[in-house]
Image: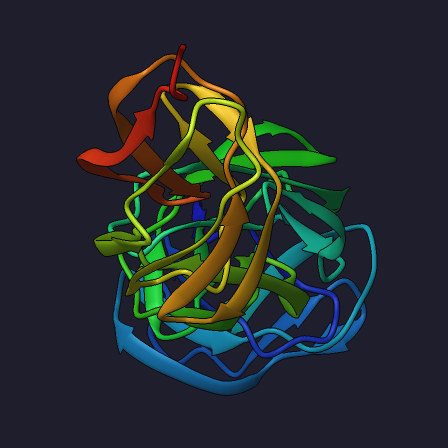
Amino acid sequence: MPISPNQGSSGGGTLVTITGTNLSGTTAVRFGTRPATAVTNVSPTQVTAISPSGNGAVGVTVTTPGGTSNPIPFFYVGAPFKQSVSPTSGSTAGGETITINGTGFSSASSVSFGANTAVPTVVSDSQITVLAPAGAAGAVGITVTTAGGTNNGLTYTYVAPPTVTTVTPDEGPTSGGTAVTVAGTGLTSTTSVTFDGAPAPFTVISDTAVSAVTPPGAAGAVDVVVSNDAGSATAVDGFTYLAGPGI
C-alpha cells in the first residue's frame, strides 16, 4: 500500500494519496498515533488525507469497517535553513550558477528569486546549486522550497550589464593622470575601469556616470572598458594618449 508523497513538513498540512485495496468506507487515517484530517475516500483503491504535525518517521494506517491496515512509512521533514548564498549578484539575463548553503536541503524542489522560480540541484542536505533565472535589475529575496516547507531571508541582486556612450575628455598625455568622465548606463555597480587593459582608479558618480583617472599608456587610441558583475562595455578607441613634444 504505497503513499505519495512519502514525506512532508513537520508542521503538517501535506496532502497525501494512499493507494491499496478494499479502502471503501475508510473511517480514519493515522500518522503514527495522530489522526489525519480531510480524509477523502476517492475510490475502493485510493484515499487522500492531510497529514497532522509530527517528527521523524511514522507509520501511516488506514482504518475501514473491515479493520486497520499494516503501517507504511512517512517521513517528517523540518523546514530548510539558509546560511549563505554565493555569488550574491549577477546579470539580469540570468544563467549564473548560485550555491546556497544551509540545512534541510535534501528534498529541495524549487528556488525562487523574487517572482521567478528555478529547479535546484541537490548536492547534499547542506548545499544546493541553481541557475539564476532572468530578472529585473535590483535586489530580490531567495526562497527555498522543500518537503519540509519554505525558507527565505537571503538576497540576490540582479545587475544590468553596463553601456558606455562617451569618455570626456577623450585625450590626454601618455604620463596618465587625466581625470575623465565615462558616461553610459548600468554604472552603479562598476567593478573596474581599464584603459588599454590597464586598471584605472575610479569613482561611481551615478548609474550613468563614472569618473576615472587615466593610468600611463603608449601614444595612440586605446579602448576604454567598464565592467560589473553582469559583464563589460567597451568604448573602442575611446581615449587617445598624446605623446609629449620633443626638441
Q: Nearer the viewer, residue 59 or 79?
A: 79
Q: Is residue 3 left or right of residue 236?
A: right
Q: Is residue 20 above or below residue 106?
A: below
Residue 35 seen anywhere in this rendered image of the structure: yes
> Which quadrant would the N terminus be assigned to in this image?
top left
User: Where in the figure is residue 216, as x and y percent of width and height?
Assistant: 52, 22
Quadrant hosting residue 136? bottom left
> Which quadrant would the C terminus be assigned to in this image?
top left
Which residue is found at the position 81% from the left and 70% from the top? Answer: 33
User: Where in the figure is residue 173, as x and y percent of width and height?
Assistant: 43, 30
User: Where in the figure is residue 235, as x and y percent of width and height?
Assistant: 21, 40
Quadrant hosting residue 37? bottom right
Which residue is found at the position 59% from the left and 41% from the top? Answer: 87
Q: Nearer the viewer, residue 177 or 162?
A: 177
Residue 67 seen anywhere in this rendered image of the structure: no
Q: Nearer the viewer, residue 223 or 22?
A: 223
The single residue placed furthest to the front in the displayed view is 247
